Image: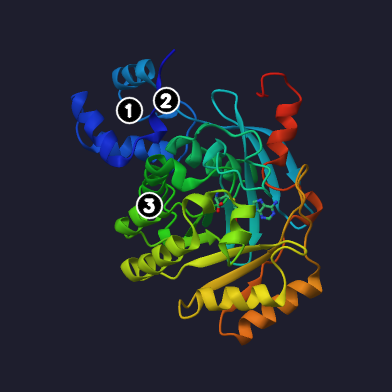
Amino acid sequence: MNRIGISSYTEDRLAALMQELGQPAFRARQLFRWLHAKQVGSFSEMTDQPKALLAALKERFFIETLAVQRRQQSRDGTVKYLLRLPDNNCIETVWMRYSYGNTVCVSTQVGCRMGCRFCASTQGGRVRNLTAGEIAGEIYAAARDQGERVSHIVLMGIGEPLDNFDNVMDFLSIISSPNGANIGMRNISLSTCGLVPMIEKLAGRRLGLTLSISLHAPTNEMRSAMMPVNDAYPLEQLIPACRAYQKTTGRRISFEYSMVNGVNDSPGTARRLASLLRGMGAHVNLIPINPVDGSPYSASDAANIRRFQTMLTQLGVNATVRRRLGTDISAACGQLRREEAGQTADGTA
Ligand code: SAH
């Protein structure tokens, strides 16, 4: 069975497919609505489509639906899902409730090859990229399970979104379409560990999303020790790429900074960070690191984080301490999948 995932098709590709099948153009929009607005799981639910068309589609295509394998519910309403993909690989998706709406944190790859030393998602390397339809399917599975609408998306789950550039771009086109889930770019954040050529490529697309950089350290020595990607794209390339991104898109970048006790949380480091980012109008999110098995890092304490924040603010850099949701299910991102993989010999569920 080598059928193709039709939920990964953008509206343009569906239009080309309908043309190829000799169908009128409006069928493409109808199909797209079934897949991404009504989010059906089978062709037979598309009740207004000609039987012959559905039969032809069924032969060549399938709908990429994800099943809930496990669910961890936090007292504050955060839900962490382990979702099973059509090929039985599993990924994690998180549902978060904020005052401004429901936010889903999606994975973009099965595993990751970026090798950040503090991150559980990268420990087994990268298995494969997710397709656009699978990433959208994470949102549909969570919304279906919760029985509620999703208003915001963050691409901050397992994987490096810019290491799966084309599928992520198709996903963004699909999910933001008014004919589909209609989640606008202003409500989408994409987080990257700092793949400079891809940041430049993304700038060229001029999307209205929020770009977030996982910075975590203001010097190459400190950052390379935490994130091997810094050897390929050191700060003297990353920061100018961020400035250029802001100039091209007119959108401010935010920086993630996970605080590690005794590693990147001293007053001297706060001063270095402030001078690195000065004049960018940047926003820094401070997050206590979530310790993972096999990592030497432990979290900075709350007083240290507050002192770091105060120093940054005094030095002219806007910084907030990220409110932590789901602390009672606080297994760091990637740990649920690793746990599940550990239960079977071949790494699948
Ligand atoms: N690959 C992308 C997106 C996924 S990681 C990126 O690197 O940005 C999402 C965020 O979680 C990143 O800022 C990442 O550095 C951070 N992160 C990963 N593991 C963490 C941990 N154990 N504790 C705190 N933050 C972590």
Q: Position of residue 33 (x, y in %)?
A: 37, 41
The quarter of the rendered structure image containing the C terminus is: top right
> What amino acid type should be assigned to the residue bearing mark 2?
Phe
Give the mark count.
3
SS for callout 1: loop
Tell me if 227 is positioned left or right of 305 in this view: left
Q: Are marks 1 and 2 in contact (CB under 8 Å)?
A: yes
Q: Is residue 45 above or below residue 135?
A: above
Q: Secondary structure at mark 2?
A: helix
Identify which residue is drawn at 19% across, 29% down. 19
**Residue beneath the point at 78% across and 60% down:** 299
Q: Is residue 267 left or right of residue 144?
A: right
**Disc number placed over residue 43 in the picture, else none:** 2
Which one is nearer the viewer's eye here, 173 or 338? 338
Q: What is the x, y in percent for residue 256? A: 59, 63
Earlier sequence position, callout 2 versus callout 3: 2
Q: Nearer the viewer, mark 2 or mark 3?
A: 3
256 or 230: nearer the eye?
Answer: 230
| SS label for mark 3 | helix
Asked whether residue 149 is in view, the answer is no
Asked where in the image residue 5 lies, by quadrant, the reply is top left
Residue underneath mark 1: 49
Q: CA distance from mark 2 to mark 3?
A: 40 Å
User: Crowding at label 1, few (<14), some or many (≥20) Cα neighbours within 10 Å?
Assistant: some
Question: Which x, y percent locates residue 226?
Answer: 64, 53
Indicate which disc, 3 or 1, sits on the residue closer to the N terminus.
Answer: 1
**Which residue is labeled 3 in the image?**
197
Circle 2 packing at 10 Å, graded few (<14), some (14-19), many (20+), is many
Image coords of residue 150 (percent x, y): 54, 53
Colour style of the rendered protein structure: rainbow
